[in-house]
Image (tube, helix red, strand yellow):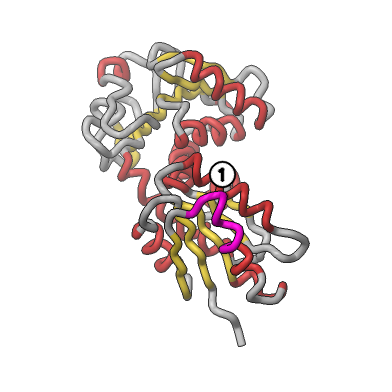
Amino acid sequence: MTKPKILLQFDTDSHASSFDAVVATDAGVDTLLQYAKVNTENVEGLVHGAMFTRGPEDLHRTAIFVGGSDVAAGEAVYERIEKCFFGPMRVSVMLDSNGANTTAAAAVLRAAKHLDLSQTTALVLGGTGPVGQRVARLLLQAGATVRLSSRQIDRARAVCDAIAARIDCGQRLSAVVGSEAIGGCDAVFACGAAGVQLLSSDELAGSDVRLAIDLNAVPPVGIEGIDVMDRGKSRQDRIDYGAIGVGGTKMKIHRAAIQRLFESNDQQLDAEAIYAIGQTV
């Protein structure tokens, strides 16, 4: 008898996300087990419960999703989970705390529909945040030149150093402050905190930017003049995307990634793997 597909949802918040639960259900999970307040200290027992209740031949029918609003906490749990596995005794794991991985993947995939990323110079506003860091990583891996922006240059430089230690990007990554480095950019991504405007409409109109993607849906939006519903909107010789305009792609990637978890028991779905899945959607 074929075992049901069981997804264990590990959330670092006080309540497991209803959003992630609905997406998992829509992705075809048979049984969803939700756990809240998961941390590096209590996750091992939960992982062992997932590993040791089925034989190796059935472990591809069990998987783990790590979520919650705190991306750093989710990353720590994700790393701790991987240390619990040995030999064939493991299950597939997906990390998408605060939707950072699926959102970044969707934004870069939207950009790739309009630009040759290997020939693109992009400004990532709010680049030191979890989504911004992932957008920068994915752009660099696609061959783009990235200017990673923060309000504090020391913070931007530290994040650039961390990314450069992970990705061989040569001189294609630089730290900048605010929107001052928009000159000569082909694309701009606003990945900052909710309700913070990072770029004015005048700054955008006075630039050479051909593609603008704003991932903030809370007023005021990150890029003035972009509507949250924009989905490839042509405006002043430029293509614009708002947060909800990118959201449809994000949802497709999220569901496809959940489904991919059950194809084998050795999937490790972080930003890069989720982006690769998005390329097939």
Does the magenta portion include 42? yes
Nearer the observer, 31 or 269: 31
Q: SS class of the residue under badge 1? A: helix
Which quarter of the image is occupied by the N terminus? bottom right
Identify which residue is drawn at 48% across, 32% down.
115
Count the numbered circles shown.
Answer: 1
Residue 247 picture location, percent across and down: 36, 47
Residue 129 in the image: x percent, y percent? Answer: 44, 31
**In the image, is residue 182 above or below residue 69?**
above
Q: Quadrant of residue 162?
A: top right
Near-viewer residue (40 or 125): 40
Q: Residue at x 62, y 54 (%)?
A: 81
Residue range in magenta is 38-46
Q: Residue at x 32, y 19 (%)?
A: 204
Q: Tag 1: residue type?
A: Ala
Q: Nearer the viewer, residue 46 or 252?
A: 46
Q: Is 5 contained in the magenta span?
A: no
Does residue 28 appear in the picture of this structure?
no
For residue 178, which quarter of the picture? top left
Give the residue at x 62% y 47%.
Answer: 79
Residue positioned most to the front = 41
Q: Is residue 167 above or below residue 17?
A: above
- Residue 107 to residue 54: above or below: above
The x and y percentages for residue 85 are 70, 58
Q: Is residue 255 visible?
A: yes
- Pointer 1: what residue? 76
Q: Residue 154 vs residue 141: left or right?
A: left
Against 209, residue 278 (above or below) is: below
- Which of 14 and 104 lies nearest the eye of the viewer? 14
